[in-house]
Each structure stands twice: as structure tokens, then as C-alpha cells.
Amino acid sequence: MERKKSPESLGFAFFFNMKNQKEESDKILLFTIPALLTFGLVMIASAGVAYSKIRFGDSYFFFKRQLLFGIVPGLVMLYVGQKINYAHWKKIAPPLFFMSIGLLVLVFIPGIGAKIYGASRWIQLSSISFQPSEMLKLSLIIYLAAWLESRGERVKDIFEGLMPFMLILGLISFLLIKQPDVGTLGVIILIAMSMFFVSGSRLSHMLAMGLAGIVLLFMLIKTEAYRVSRFLVFLHPEIDPQGVGYQINQALLALGSGGFFGVGLGHSLQKFNYLPEPVGDSIFAIIGEELGFVGASILVMLFVILAMRGLKIAKNAPDNFSRLLAIGIVSWIFFQAFINIAAISGIIPLTGIPLPFISYGGTSVVFLMLGVGILLNISKHTKLD
């Protein structure tokens, strides 16, 4: 009598990654993510207490929204990401990427896209807003990992490697510049170039793209007055402290007030309508004020641990697709965190991008958690020390 096939033999084992793998995901990475999420929730509760009360009549509005629409669905996506075999993402890479491009176009359609603070970056569905650029980051990483793997050694060729790669970035750049969202574009370019470099591209091609990027950046600065103002304030923070230099001056004041140990959790003064976006782009300044150099250093260390563990997973990845996928996810988190912290600290001009896992924003947390889930799944197939 023929033995009846189990669900695993029908392909479920491949999809849910139940065979031929380690039983556990990387433990250090699993510790780091809850630590970052808890850190973020605590700081959103503290930094947003005044803004939440004034705007919504509820001191913990941002905390509740982040928990219900960011952390909870994010944990679900983390579970899904670490359960599904990473190789499955290669199959759906093209439709996922082009769906992200389609959603990016929808932000410009009246009645669907929402224009906030002069920027068209959100899709508004009733009371829920969705930022397609956050989905684009992850879908681009998956798409590039699959595409670069398929190129093989041809990635070194100008016409089969460099030019198609530039066309992909060109399409994304056009849509993000139109929003405008140059900060996100900068993160995406750094992610893409990291993956392109690791795939085996020529150093001359990387240098050419770097020079082209610098030229594009200065062109973008010159075409918009607010970008010129931000650049001038970066060079001379003391100019117009009540105008264009207000945010960076208040951020530096908050960081300086914190000293070594901080003024204490919940005791920030800058969050009381002095510092713009205290739960968003500027949350690192509140961290520095309330928790001081020690608290800010702990947060930076958590990002460094995440990056180092992610690179270890990439180094020991079982194939080129998973290696590129891991590099893309790690680059995404590290570069975005670095740009946010550097901008608030006055090291680079202000950009307006969130601090991963920490800043308020459900869409960002959900896709970051899915990305980390995929990274955890890759870790199940590696031999880590």
C-alpha cells in the first residue's frame, strides 16, 4: 500500500523552513531587537507626553498608537519573516518590487495620497496612514539580492551590470525626489551601493557612482531653497536660531543639557514645544537630554551589536542570495540609524528620517521587523560561533 504523502513532502517544509536548518535563530540578534523596541516605546512615552496632550488630549496617544499599530503587527511580521524560508522571497521579488513602485506613485494621486508639511509621502486610508517608501526599502533589498545573484560575474560589465543598476536607482530617485524625500533616497542609495559592492562590482564603477551621487546631491541642494538653508545652517549653526536654524539649535541644546548621565527620564524641557518632532526625527535629542551620554551610548551600542551580528550572518550565509539579502537589511538599519543620529548631533545636515525601532511610525517598525525576521531566518541556515 502506497504511503500517503505528508504536508512537508508537498512543499510546506520549504515554505515554512521546518527542515534542514538549525532549531533556533541567532540569540544575540533576538536579544537586541526587543531591547531596541523597549527603548523606543519608553522614549516615545516620555518624549511625546506634552505633544500628545496638546494635539490629541491624551498624554500617551503616540505610545498607544506605536504599540497597537507598530509593535504588535511588527512582532507578527517578525514571526512570519523568521518562519518563511528566505529562498521563497526570491520568487516574489519582482512583483513585490513593482508593487512598491506602484504604491509610491499613488501618493501623488489626489484623494489617495496625503500631503503633510508640503510632502507627498503617505497614502491615507480612513484614519490609517501608510508610507510606501518604507515598504520600498525592503522590497528593493529583496529585488536587488535576486537580481545581483542572477548577474553573477556579469555584474562587472558596464552594460549588463552598471547601466541596469543605475536605471533601477534612477527610477526610484525620480519618484522620491518628486515627493520630496531626499533623506530616504540617501539611505536607499547607500543600501543599493553596499549590495552592489558586495556582489563583486568593479571599484571603478563604485567610484564613478560615488562622484555622480555627490554631483546629484549638490544639484538637489541648489534647486530648493529649504535645502540650501539646511546646508548653510549645517555650516553655520549660529545663523537664524529662531528660523531655519531653530531645530538643530534646539537639538544641540537638548544634547548638551543632558551631560553625562542626563536630567532623568521624563524630565526633558525641550519636549515641551521647544524641539520639533520630539517623537519622530528628533527623538535622539530627547534621549541625550534625559539619559545623557550614557543612555545615548547604550542605544548606539545596541545598533553596533545588531550590525556586527548581521554582518556575521551575512559572512556565513549559505548562498549568494542570502548573503546579499543580509547585507541589504543590515545596511538599511545601520545607515538609517547613523544618518539620523549624525544629523541630530550636527555632524551632517538635517535630513528628516526616523531612527529605526525608536522613532514614532508604525509603517517603519512593521517593515523593519519583517526585515529582521528574514535576517533571523537566514541565521538558521548559518554556522555561527
Image (tube, rainbow, N blue to C red):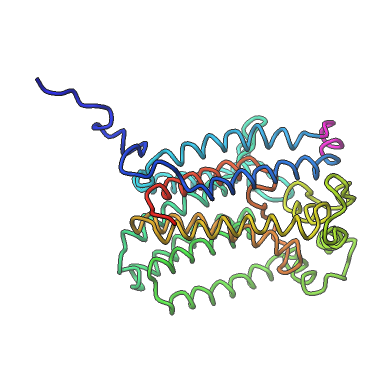
Going 47% across and 53% down the picture, which residue do you hit?
140
Inspect this view and state whether residue 105 appears: no
Q: Is residue 118 left or right of residue 217?
A: right
The N terminus: image quadrant: top left
Q: Depth check: 72 or 157 in front?
A: 72
Which residue is the extreme one toward the top?
1
Instruction: Give the total number of marks visible in the rendering.
Output: 0
Q: Depth check: 114 or 320 in front?
A: 320
Which residue is the extreme one toward the bottom?
204
Inspect this view and state whether residue 230 appears: yes
Going 90% across and 61% down the picture, which residue do you hit?
242
Which residue is the extreme one toward the front?
385
The x, y position of residue 247, in whole percent, is: 82, 58
Look at the image and say whether residue 53 sits in the magenta stretch: yes
Give the vertical position of 373 relative to 9 (above or below).
Answer: below
The x, y position of residue 383, in whole percent, is: 38, 54
Give the vertical position of 222 relative to 369 (above or below).
Answer: below
Going 70% across and 46% down the picture, which residue do you hit?
39
Picture quadrant where residue 204 is located: bottom left
The C terminus: image quadrant: bottom left
Going 53% across and 74% down the picture, which residue do you hit?
210
Q: Is residue 96 left or right of residue 229?
A: left
The x, y position of residue 334, in whole percent, is: 58, 59
Q: Is residue 185 left or right of residue 344?
A: left
Q: Which residues are magenta?
A: 52-59
Q: What secondary structure characterizes most of the magenta part? A: helix
Picture quadrant where residue 298 is located: bottom right
Q: Depth check: 65 or 133 in front?
A: 65
Give the vertical position of 23 relative to 256 (above or below).
Answer: above
Look at the image and say whether residue 85 sits in the magenta stretch: no
